Image (cartoon, rainbow, N blue to C red):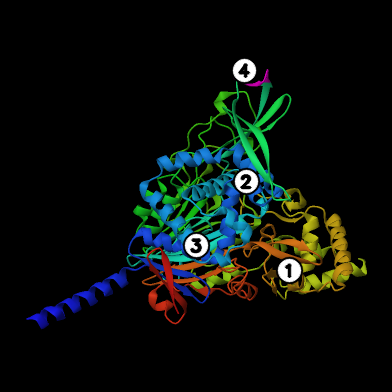
Amino acid sequence: MEKRFLLLCILLTALYYQVAKAQQAKIDWDEWGVPHITATNEKDLFFAQGWAEMQAHANLVLKVYGTARGKAAAYWGPQFETSDLLIHNLNFLQITRSFQKSQDPELKQIIRSFTDGMNAYAKAHPEVIDKNNTVVLPVTPDDVNLQSLFIFVTRFIGGSEFTHVPNWEDMGSNALAVAAKRTASHNAMLVQNPHLPWSGEFTFFESELTLNGNPVYGANLIGFPGIAIGFNKYLGWTHTNNTLDNADSFEISLKDGGYLLDGKRHEFKTRNDTIWIKQTNGTLLPKPMKFYSSAYGDVLKMGKNKALAIKVAGTDRPNALFEWWKMAKSRNFNQFEAALKMQQLPFWNILYADATGSIFYLFNGLVPRRPGGTFEYWNQIIEGGASKNIWSSYLKYDELPKLKDPASGWLQNANDPPWTVTLPRELNKKNYPAYIAPDKMELRPQRAANMMLADSNITFEHLIDYKLSTHIGLADRVLDDLLAGIDSASSPLLQEAKQVLSKWDRNADNDSKGMLLFYAWANMFQPMNEYNYAVRWNADQPNTTPYGLRDKKHSLQLLEQAAKLMKGTFSDLATSWGTFYRLRRNGIDLPANGVDGGLGVFRVANTEQRGKTAVVSSGDSWVGIIEFGEKIRAKVLLSYGNSSQKQSVHNGDQLKLFSEKKLRDAWFYPEDLQGHIAFTEVKQGDTFITNK
C-alpha cells in the first residue's frame, strides 16, 4: 500500500512539473531574429513581448520613450529642445494621466506587463544598454501612452501641420486585397506594405504572439505592445496612410491679450511649465515656458496681432492599442468589424482579407464632423473667428467610406483617396461629405490598379512579382514622346541619351541601365506637376491619365541637362541603377532597387543623398504577402532587419534579400519553425532562462 502511495505521489509530482512546464511562457527566436512567443495568459504573453523587444531594440526603445516624455533635451542635449517644446505645448503628460483613468482594464494590464518585461530585460542585461540611455529606466505604462500620443498626433494626424517632422513626404504605404473569386487557388490574399522611415520611432518590430494555441503574426512600431499589421489563422489586415485631414490649423485674431471668437474677446487658458536642457558640462539649464490654449486648440505660435492654434483628433481615444489587439484576436469578419466600431484608432485605411474568401476596405480614422466645405478648404490654415468651424465630434463608423467584396474582386490603396480603391469605381464621392477626401489618383496607385486589372486569375507568385515590381509607370506615359523628339539634327549628347533610354527596360532594378538617366531627367521634369503633361489627370480615366509632354522642347532641354550632369558625375550614361542607389546599414553596402513612388513604382525606396550615391532611408519596410487557404501561406520581409542593437547579427541581415528582390518564409506554424530555432528562452519568475 505504501509503495502504491509513493508511486502515485511520484506520478502526480511528475505530472505537475509537466503541466507547469507547458504553461511556462517561452520565446523561440528564429534564424532571422524573430521572436515566436507562446503563453497561456496575456500577462505572460506581453511580458515576453516586452522582454523580446528590448533584446532587439533596447537602446532605440529607451531613446524613443525618452523623446516621447518630452525630456530628451534634459537627457541628451539641446538638439532635442524643439521636440520637447511641442510635447509640452500639446500637454501630452496630462492627456496620458487621463488615459490611465479611462483605459480598459485589460489594456492597462497588457501595457503594465509589456513594460514589466522591458524592465526585467534591462535589469538582467545592463551590459547591452548604452550608458547615456540608462537615465530613461525604469520605463512605465505612461511611456507607452506617451509614445502612442507622440506617434499618432505628431507623426501622422498632425504630421503635415508640424513642419519639423522629418521625412513626412516619405511616409506612405501600399496594400492589395484579392478576393477568392479572382485567384487561381480560390483563396483570398493580402499584401501588407507600409513605407516608413527606416529609423527612430518609425522602426517596426516583427513578432509572433501565440495565446493558448492561437497565433498572430506581424509587426508593430517599437514601443507598442501587440500587432498593428498582421494575420492569424482566419484573417489578416494592413494599414495605409489615408487622405484624412483630422488636424486643423487656425489663424486667430488677438485683442487686448486675448483672442476673438464670434466677434467677442476671450481669455486664453495659460499653463506654466519648464523644459530642462542638458549643457555640455552635464548641468541642467531650466527654460521656463508659458503655454496658451484656446477654443481653437493649443497655440503653437503667438504674434503681435495673430496667433496660430492647432486642433487635433485622437487625444480623447485612450484605447487605440486595445482596438489593434481585438482586431488581432478576431476569428471572423463580424468580430473584426466589432473591433473597428470602437473607433479608437485615429488614422489609417484598413484593407482586410479572410479565410472565407472575403475582402474589405475601410477609410478608417477619426473624421471631424464639420459644418461643410471641401477637403481643399480644410487642408490649409483656416481663418479663425467663427465658432461653427470648431468641431467637437467625429463621423460615426457607419458614415465612413467602406467596401466589402467588390464586384471586381480586388482592392488597392497606395495613399490615394477611397474613391479609387477598386475600378470600375464602386464608392461614390457624392454620397459623403465633400471634406472627407479629394478625388485624385497618383501614378503609384494607378500602377497598383493596373496590375490588378490585367490579371483575372491571380496567384500567390503573381502577388510576389507585383509587390517587388520596379516598373516605372511614368516612363510608360512620357518616354515615347520624349524620344520621338530626338532626331539626326539633335545634339550628339541627346542622340546618345536616346540610344541608352531606348534600350532601358523601364525598371529600377539593380542592373537597370538607363534608369539613372531617366531619374535625373524626371527630377527636373517634376512628375507631380500635372501642368507638365499634354493630357492631365481625368477623374473619368483615373488609371490612364496623365500622359504625354506638354512642352516637348523644354523636356528635351531638361534631358540634355540631365545627361550633362550624369557625364560629369559618372562619365557613362548607361551607369547601372545600383551603382547610384545603395543599401547601407551596420557595415553592409549593397545595390538597391526601387525608387520614389512619385515615378509610379510599386517598389518604393526613398533615399538620402550621400556624395555620388543615394542611400535608401525609407520606403518598403514591412512586407507581408498572405494566402488564406486551409493553411496559411505567407512570405514576409522586414527590410532593415529585426534589431537595431549595434552588436546584433540581425541589424541589417535582411538587406541582402531586399537587394536580390526576395522575401522569406513566415514560420507561422510550430512545425514550420522546427529546424529554424536559433535559441529558446523560458520564463522563470520575472526573468527568462536561455535554452540553447
- Quadrant that contains the N terminus: bottom left
**Amino acid at pointer 4:** Arg
Q: Is residue 246 visible?
A: yes
Residue 70 at what x, y percent from top left? 60, 45
Q: Is residue 426 visible?
A: no
Membership of 260 in magenta stretch:
yes
Magenta residues, start to end? 255-262
Q: CA distance from mark 2 to mark 3?
A: 35 Å
> Closer to the N terminus: mark 3 or mark 1?
3
**Quick check: 301 left or right of 628?**
right
Please identify, in this view, whether the residue under mark 3 or under mark 4 is nearer the observer: 3
Label drawn at residue 123: 3
Membership of 206 in magenta stretch:
no
> Closer to the N terminus: mark 2 or mark 3?
3
Please identify, in this view, whether the residue under mark 2 or under mark 1 is nearer the observer: 2
Q: CA distance from mark 2 to mark 1?
A: 27 Å
**Residue on which the image places disc 1:** 581
Q: Secondary structure at mark 4?
A: strand
> Closer to the N terminus: mark 3 or mark 4?
3
Label drawn at residue 159: 2
Residue 10 at what x, y percent from top left? 19, 79
Q: CA distance from mark 3 to mark 1?
A: 41 Å
| Residue found at x 78% / y 58% | 523
**Amino acid at pointer 2:** Gly
- Quadrant that contains the C terminus: bottom left
Q: CA distance from mark 3 to mark 4?
A: 55 Å
**Amino acid at pointer 1:** Tyr
